[in-house]
Amino acid sequence: MIVMSESELNAIRRKKLRELQRRLAKKEKKTKGVNADNVLNRIFRGRAWEVFNAASYQYPGTMQRIKEVLVKLTLTGRLNEVTGEQLYLFLKNLGLKIRLNTKINFASHGKLKSLAEKMKENL
């Protein structure tokens, strides 16, 4: 059995703590040097950018933090793909109510008509 004094144990703890802090600082430098939009562009599918931009406009501070988290998850390999629907539900579960511009169009006789135009036609 090896017996160590209290001062030796504290020295080992301090050394390990410095090493962990150095590793953490190195990881943070890597994530800051990366363009976040390029990273998100790799994983966003479908209408994810539309949802993300609408949410960023409505909740700029919160979305900046969420953006950082999404980038970290992507760089560590925990996140591979996010669709617009998944992002919308994720933000909704966080308590953010995102308002999206919604249009309803009808294809009628080879032409696209808005809901308002279609209703005027029927009246």
Image (cartoon, rainbow, N blue to C red):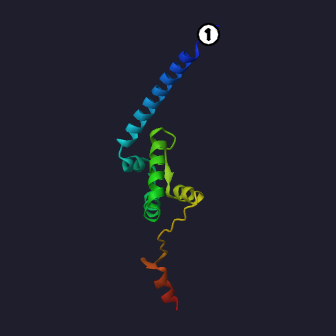
Coordinates of residue 45 in the picture (x, y in percent): 46, 53
**37 or 110: nearer the eye?**
37
Coordinates of residue 84 in the picture (x, y in percent): 50, 58
Q: Residue at x 38, y 38 (%)?
A: 29
Count all numbered tags in the image, as a single digit.
1
Q: Which residue is mark 1?
A: 3
Would residue 46 be seen by someone viewing this image from the given angle? no
Would residue 63 be seen by someone viewing this image from the given angle? yes
Q: Is residue 101 left or right of residue 35?
A: right
Coordinates of residue 76 in the picture (x, y in percent): 47, 38
Q: Residue at x 50, y 68 (%)?
A: 99
Q: Residue at x 42, y 61 (%)?
A: 53
**8 or 2: nearer the eye?**
8
Q: Residue at x 50, y 27 (%)?
A: 17
**17 or 35: nearer the eye?**
17
Toward the right, the furthest residue is 1
Q: Is residue 32 left or right of residue 118?
A: left
Q: Is residue 34 left or right of residue 95?
A: left
**108 or 6: nearer the eye?**
6
Determine whether 65 is above or below 114 in the image.
Answer: above
Q: Secondary structure at mark 1?
A: loop
Coordinates of residue 37 in the picture (x, y in percent): 38, 50
Determine whether 55 is above or below 4 in the image.
Answer: below
Amino acid of disc 1: Val
